[in-house]
């Protein structure tokens, strides 16, 4: 009969592909469970208020028109809905494909069963498949994997969250209009079950059987599978379902009367005591046994070959004991609110004398023993044929030599010529030579016969008297024995070790031992070498999901391998992170001693002061801490390069990544805590906090400078890379609030899985420390409360005339956050400017373009000033009337324009500081870049680049805006801030207007300047005709604007004169 898994067996290959796909689907579900957008949980009040109207559960399907009409009635809500779609459709599509694959899996399995029933596969029925060992296993796995999928979905993705994601996908995708879509079936399968994975949550009625019944499966098939399993499986009360997902049958079987009664027989107090005591005694006996086997030099080749069954039994007993104790004492297996479960757990712990540290030590020793035994056996297996042939050659040569001895030709003390023995030994030599390695069974039988013949020839021919002949015979027998041992080295032993040593049940439970692992490493860093064997043992769990995928030659092999290998490597990093943490703790003490205790030795020192500067105690403490750091480094480097699944783990890279992770964690936390400001403080906390933060960052920098030689890393390179990554990531997250399409963590080029940048809850309207810093700078330099002196680069308080801050602020930011921080602030200010300009345009359209009365006013104004090159008659009255008619619209405009100007001044100061730092720290590179910049394009600093700007208006209506500015300049006497009640700062106003004009076509600027010129000429003409001696302040303001316009834009003065 054809092998069920043979490539030409269509029936076997079909179910193998289904099972392979099932394992891949579970891996994808587990992977996606880490990327559920938090907004779909609606846990925060802010999320509920903001997204409550656009995120719906399945109640949406009862009246979709109601929800859609509610959206259409509110443009703001519709805009938010569009933004939400753009940000989440990609991840929703990924989740939907995973959900769809679950439904397709069960549909394909049912179709396969129907094909078996209808005789599509010739000579194969459900009964014959279940009679076949492989067929039975695959069908059981196929049904079991479907159950695992549903349980994983319910445990990892809450029912309400699933419903919200499916409804959102339905609303945003084209699936709703597709005739081929099976979205309805998927929604029916994955609607909320009411189950909650939270501790103490009540189990829903008829759960999980009602959940499993949502897609009907042949009851005959299920009965036959259970019938086959009933005689095959032995259950414990706590079992591992799949890759560490544990279930306590006491709780799981509670609703099922017959199962509950059957289980209760095994759960009486006496039986639990018997089981727990048995494993306790087993652990006590196995510990010294394993430790004896691990003694250096004990496990030798001959010991292993002579004791394979004993060693395997020892390995089996260790793994069985570890498995039982781990599963039956795991916190995840017991609901703390269930009294009976608590009693069972307490009894198991007491009767087994459970000690997690002892269990962990046995696990370590077992893993080390298993690893050593496997490696030695692999080596013996690889050298098996070579050694066997070597022993055969040695035995044949000994027999040939003995034949020559009895020929009388080769002299040997007191050996007479014996032709019969000569012929006999030659024949034995030929027999040994003829042994065939490929036919191991026949060779083994024949070898035993040859050994017996050599024993008999020694007895019957009275050869004992000649010690040299006896030695030859003994050596030959020894080589023949070695051949038998070697031929019995089978790959089946490795397979047995793999099955016995399976640790997949501990895939999640092992995390409860993390603190014990880390403490043991902290006390003894060389413990890492033993942990390596434990990690490799845990890697064997990958065989469970990959076996069928590999057999089916599925393309999912790489993806699934990468997922589970990545999960394991992440756990390895988590355990070993204690080393960088301990190093940084020691490092903090070293820096504290260096700064506060150890005095810096001067270049010249008087002899009598030498003792004062020696400070032997403090220097000894520094040396002791430095030695501890070196020991930690040595410990992790002892681990050797290890292949964990399909990912190669390099200990040096692991150490560097761990140091980077700890650095990122500490620096990010310091920046978060150090840059929180109180906006109500009488005196700004900005400068003191920046100075304090600069000292903290300098401490980190000095620490890295000190540590790099002792741990063999490039300290400065790591420092610059990680600090820039922290700042750029925080800038990116802060800028997200200004973007329609947000950059998610998994899309960010700055975020990393292995070296994650922590996110902290917001303390105010800013999302990150960079936002708080930027808003604090904007607050203290508010143009409504301060006056900026351009020549001094200083801000003064409008009321007290005291200095608020100056350009030293940006030098302090440079000292604290470096170039990356200044660049990040500049980028954030650009986003804020764009937002302000968009607000300006929105207000402009609302107050002018959509107001017919105001449009008529501006049309009348236009006709009054035309032609622009002419003179306006009765200018003072005409301009005064225009200002009076448009008085109400200037407040919001003035505020927006000055905000933009304020940000431009800050950007100027940032550019000046960056330019100065660049020329000071890297003058050659600065000169090269300056020349390149000049050769490529002219500098236009005032332009807000299109990269930051997503909406620009070039409408003919903008001529009204220009006339607004024209009329506003007739009001300049109030802009010079002569009254404290009307605070206007000149520089922000000019720069704001300039930036605003730069957003439109140059002809608008030309027209604006022409109108200013007309205003100056008209007013001055009137003053001349009326013989007014003083130049009006309005004209002075207009001329000042032109002067500053030319200066800021670096245009020739001729432009202003024209």
Image: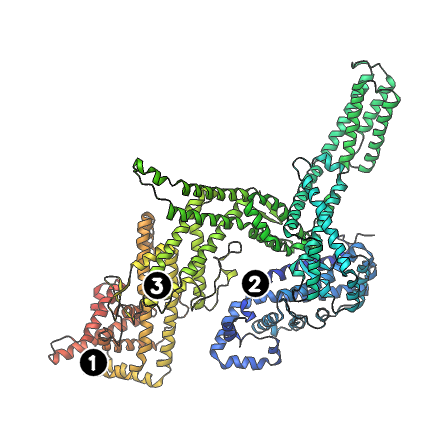
Please tell me which residue lies in front, 222 or 325.
325
Say which of marks 2 and 1 sits in front.
Answer: 2
Label 1 sits on a secondary structure element that is: loop
Q: Which mark is residue 460?
A: none
Please tell me which residue lies in front, 330 or 24.
330
| Outermost bottom residue | 853
Say which of marks 3 and 2 sits in front.
Answer: 3
Q: Is residue 186 left or right of residue 632?
A: right
Residue to which mark 2 is pinned = 35
Residue to which mark 1 is pinned = 872
Mark 3 or mark 1: name the one nearer the start of the chain: 3
Q: Is residue 899 left or right of residue 425?
A: left
* Quarter of the figure with residue 881: bottom left
Q: Position of residue 319 (x, y in %)?
A: 71, 49
Where 19 falls versus 389 (above or below)? below
- All told, the count of numbered labels is 3
Asked if the residue under mark 2 is in contact with the one under mark 3, i.e. CB atoms within 8 Å, the reply is: no
Mark 1 Cα shell of 10 Å, populated few (<14), some (14-19), many (≥20): many
- Looking at the rendered image, the quarter that the C terminus falls into is bottom left
Residue to which mark 3 is pinned = 685
Q: Position of residue 365 (x, y in %)?
A: 66, 45
Label 2 sits on a secondary structure element that is: helix
Where 797 falls versus 67 (above or below)? above
């Amino acid at each position: 009969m054809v092998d069920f898994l043979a490539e030409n067996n269509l029936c076997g290959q079909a179910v193998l592909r289904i099972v392979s796909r099932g394992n891949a689907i579970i891996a994808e579900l587990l992977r996606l469970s880490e990327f559920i957008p938090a907004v779909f949980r609606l846990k925060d009040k802010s999320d509920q208020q903001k997204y409550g109207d656009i995120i719906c559960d399945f109640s949406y399907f009862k009246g979709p028109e109601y929800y859609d009409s509610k959206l259409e009635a509110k443009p703001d809500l519709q805009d938010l809905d569009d933004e939400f779609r753009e940000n989440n459709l990609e991840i929703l599509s990924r989740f939907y494909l995973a959900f769809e694959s679950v439904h397709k899996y069960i549909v394909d399995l049912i179709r396969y069963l129907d094909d078996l029933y209808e005789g599509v596969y010739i000579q194969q029925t459900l009964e014959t498949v279940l009679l076949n060992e492989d067929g039975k296993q695959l069908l059981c796995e196929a049904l079991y994997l479907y159950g695992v999928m549903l349980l994983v979905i319910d445990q990892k993705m809450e029912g309400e969250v699933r419903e919200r994601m499916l409804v959102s996908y339905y609303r945003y995708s084209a699936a709703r209009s597709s005739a081929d879509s099976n979205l309805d079936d998927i929604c029916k399968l994955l609607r909320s079950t009411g189950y909650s994975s939270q501790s103490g949550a009540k189990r829903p009625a008829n759960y999980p059987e009602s959940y499993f019944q949502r897609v009907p499966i042949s009851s005959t098939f299920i009965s036959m599978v259970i019938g086959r399993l009933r005689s095959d499986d032995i259950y414990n009360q706590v079992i591992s379902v799949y890759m560490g997902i544990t279930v306590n049958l006491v709780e799981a079987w509670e609703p099922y009367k017959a199962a509950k009664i059957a289980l209760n027989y095994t759960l009486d107090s006496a039986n639990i005591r018997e089981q727990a005591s048995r494993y306790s005694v087993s652990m006590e006996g196995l510990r010294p046994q394993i430790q004896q086997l691990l003694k250096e030099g004990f496990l030798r080749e001959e010991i292993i070959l002579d004791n394979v069954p004993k060693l395997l039994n020892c390995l089996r007993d260790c793994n069985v004991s570890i498995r039982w104790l781990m599963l039956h004492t795991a916190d995840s297996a017991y609901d703390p609110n269930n009294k009976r479960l608590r009693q069972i757990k307490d009894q198991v712990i007491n009767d087994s004398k459970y000690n997690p540290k002892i269990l962990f030590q046995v696990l370590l020793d077992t893993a080390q023993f298993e690893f050593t035994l496997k490696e030695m056996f692999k080596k013996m297996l690889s050298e098996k044929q070579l050694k066997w042939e070597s022993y055969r050659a040695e035995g044949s040569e000994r027999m040939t030599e003995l034949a020559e001895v009895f020929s009388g030709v080769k002299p040997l003390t007191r050996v007479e010529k014996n032709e019969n023995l000569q012929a006999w030994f030659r024949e034995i030599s030929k027999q040994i030579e003829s042994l065939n390695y490929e036919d191991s069974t026949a060779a083994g039988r024949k070898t035993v016969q040859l050994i017996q013949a050599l024993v008999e020839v020694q007895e019957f021919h009275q050869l004992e008297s000649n010690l040299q002949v006896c030695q030859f015979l003994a050596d030959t027998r020894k080589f023949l024995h070695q051949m038998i041992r070697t031929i019995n080295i089978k790959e089946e032993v490795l397979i047995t070790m793999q099955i016995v040593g399976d640790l997949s049940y501990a895939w999640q439970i092992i995390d409860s031992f993390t603190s014990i692992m880390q403490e043991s490493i902290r006390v003894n860093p060389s413990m890492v070498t033993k942990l390596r064997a434990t990690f490799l043992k845990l890697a064997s769990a990958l065989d469970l999901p990959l076996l069928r995928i590999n057999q089916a030659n599925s393309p999912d092999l790489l993806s699934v391998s990468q997922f589970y290998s990545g999960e394991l490597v992440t756990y390895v990093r988590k355990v070993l992170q204690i080393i960088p943490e301990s190093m940084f703790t020691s490092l903090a003490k070293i820096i504290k001693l260096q700064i506060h205790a150890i005095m810096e030795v001067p270049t010249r020192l008087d002899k009598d002061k030498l003792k004062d500067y020696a400070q032997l105690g403090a220097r000894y403490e520094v040396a002791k801490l430095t030695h501890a750091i070196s020991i930690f480094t040595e410990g992790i480097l002892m681990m050797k390069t290890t292949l964990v699944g399909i990912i190669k783990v390099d200990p040096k890279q692991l150490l560097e990544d761990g140091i980077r992770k700890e650095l990122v964690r500490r620096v990010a936390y310091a920046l978060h805590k150090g840059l929180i400001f109180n906006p109500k403080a009488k005196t700004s906390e900005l400068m003191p906090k920046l100075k304090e933060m600069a000292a903290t960052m300098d401490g980190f920098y000095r620490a890295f400078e000190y540590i790099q030689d002792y741990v063999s890393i490039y300290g400065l390179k790591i420092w610059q890379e990680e600090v820039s990554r922290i700042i750029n990531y925080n800038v990116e997250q802060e800028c997200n609030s200004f973007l329609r399409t947000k950059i998610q963590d998994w899309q960010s080029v700055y975020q990393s899985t292995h070296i994650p940048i922590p996110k902290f809850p917001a303390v105010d309207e800013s999302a990150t420390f960079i936002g708080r810093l930027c808003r604090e700078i904007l607050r203290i330099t508010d143009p409504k409360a301060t006056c900026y002196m351009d020549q001094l680069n200083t801000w003064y308080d409008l009321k007290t005339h005291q200095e608020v801050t100056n350009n030293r602020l940006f030098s302090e930011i440079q000292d604290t956050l470096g170039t990356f921080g200044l660049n990040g602030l500049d980028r954030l200010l650009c986003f804020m400017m764009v937002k302000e300009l968009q607000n300006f345009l929105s207000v402009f359209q609302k107050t002018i373009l959509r107001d017919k009365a105001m449009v008529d006013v501006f049309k009348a104004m236009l006709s009054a000033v035309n032609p622009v090159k002419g003179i306006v008659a009765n200018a003072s009255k005409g301009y005064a009337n225009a200002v009076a008619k448009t008085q109400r619209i200037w407040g919001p405009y003035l505020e927006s324009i000055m905000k933009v100007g304020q940000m431009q001044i800050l950007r100027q100061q940032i550019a000046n500081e960056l330019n100065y730092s660049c020329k000071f720290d890297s003058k050659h590179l600065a000169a090269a870049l300056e020349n390149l910049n000049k050769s490529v394009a002219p500098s236009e600093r005032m332009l807000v680049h299109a990269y930051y700007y997503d909406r620009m208006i070039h409408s003919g209506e903008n001529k009204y805006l220009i006339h607004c500015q024209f009329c506003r300049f007739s009001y300049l006497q109030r802009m010079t801030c002569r009254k404290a009640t009307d605070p206007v700062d000149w520089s922000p106003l000019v720069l704001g207007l300039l930036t605003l004009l730069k957003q439109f076509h140059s002809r608008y600027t030309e027209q604006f300047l022409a109108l200013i010129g007309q205003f100056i000429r008209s007013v001055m003409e009137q003053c001349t005709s009326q013989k007014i001696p003083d130049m009006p302040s309005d004209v002075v303001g207009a001329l000042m604007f032109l002067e500053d316009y030319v200066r800021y834009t670096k245009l020739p003065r001729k432009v202003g004169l024209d």
